[in-house]
Image (cartoon, rainbow, N blue to C red):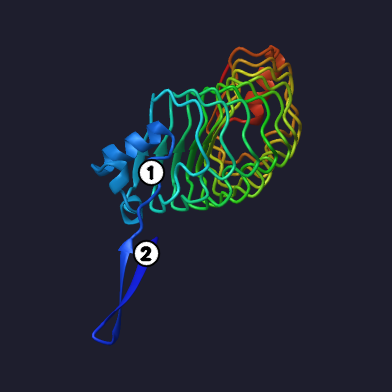
Amino acid sequence: MSRIWICFVVAGFAVNFSLNAKADICGRTKQVTATLERVLGKDCRSIVADDLSEIKKLVLTNQSITELAPGDFTGLKSLKVLVLDENLLTTLPEGLFDDTPSLQNLQLNLNQLNSLPEGIFRGLKSLEVLSLWRNELEVLPEKIFNGLTSIYRIGLLENRIKVLPENLFAGLSTLDILYLSENRLTAIPEKIFRGLKSLRFLTLNSNQLTTLPEGLFTGLSSLDDLRLQENQLMSLPATLFADTTSLRIMNLEKNKLSQYDKDKLKKTLPNVTIIF
């Protein structure tokens, strides 16, 4: 909490009291300033630090925002939900979320994001939902998700991702839902899902995959629903599903599997509903 402490002397005694320091709102990105004014019902010149610390949700959808400044969300220490969908963002500045430690839900869908700094989500230990649907991302830094110890859902579908770093999801033991569909993946690193013991729902459909490495699903004992349709899979390794003991449904429509492979897969996974 930012305060100005004032000391003066009355009748020989020192008296201290504090005033809330005004927050620097007027100088932020104009759409951010306008939204903060609307949420708080105050002119930007009257907003103080205590006002910002009370905000739990901020929606900036379809505001034609082309860029954000590093200090745009400074002081929003209680913010839990931030929606930035349907804007014109191409990247995000390092440090943008440094002062939002309570953030749980971050929506960045339907922008034009083509790159992200490796440390952009650093410190967001409370983040549960991260949505980056329908952007223009081609590459992700290997450590971009490091430290997201509460993450439950990550949405990366409808981007232009061609390659995934092997350690991209390392340490995300709480991850339950992962969307990787409708990208341009031609291959998947064998150990990319290693350690995702809570992963229940995985979409890899609508990519350009021709095969899957034998150990890709090792350790995914919670995996319940797997989407692999609309790829170019011609065969699947015999032991690919050895650890997917909870698998209930799998979609393999519009691939290039032979009838022999389909029949073999049905025998290997008799308790799984497989859609061809």
Residue 4 disc label: 2
Give the amino acid type for the residue marked by disc 1 in the picture. Answer: Ile
Query: Seen in the image, is 154 located left or right of residue 207?
Result: left
Residue 1 shows in this picture: no
User: Measured along the vertical axis of the image, is residue 216 above or below residue 197?
Assistant: above
Query: Seen in the image, is 114 located left or right of residue 36?
Result: right
Residue 116 disc label: none
* Residue 228 location, quadrant: top right
User: Measured along the vertical axis of the image, is residue 140 above or below residue 47?
Assistant: above
Cα–Cα gap, marks 1 and 2: 17 Å
Residue 25 disc label: 1
Residue closest to the eye, 204 or 82:
82
Local secondary structure at mark 1: loop
Callout 1: few (<14), some (14-19), or many (20+) C-alpha neighbours within 10 Å?
Answer: many
**Where's residue 261, x and y in %?**
70, 18
User: Measured along the vertical axis of the image, is residue 18 above or below residue 10?
Assistant: above
Quarter occupied by the N terminus: bottom left
**Where's residue 186, x and y in %?**
72, 21
Query: Seen in the image, is 157 located left or right of residue 78?
Result: right
Q: Residue at x 58, y 24 (%)?
A: 181
**Where's residue 108, x and y in %?**
48, 31
Residue closest to the eye, 12 or 118:
12
Q: Residue at x 52, y 26 (%)?
A: 89
Residue closest to the eye, 246 or 90:
90
Give the amino acid type for the residue marked by disc 2 in the picture. Answer: Ile
Local secondary structure at mark 2: strand
Q: How many marks?
A: 2
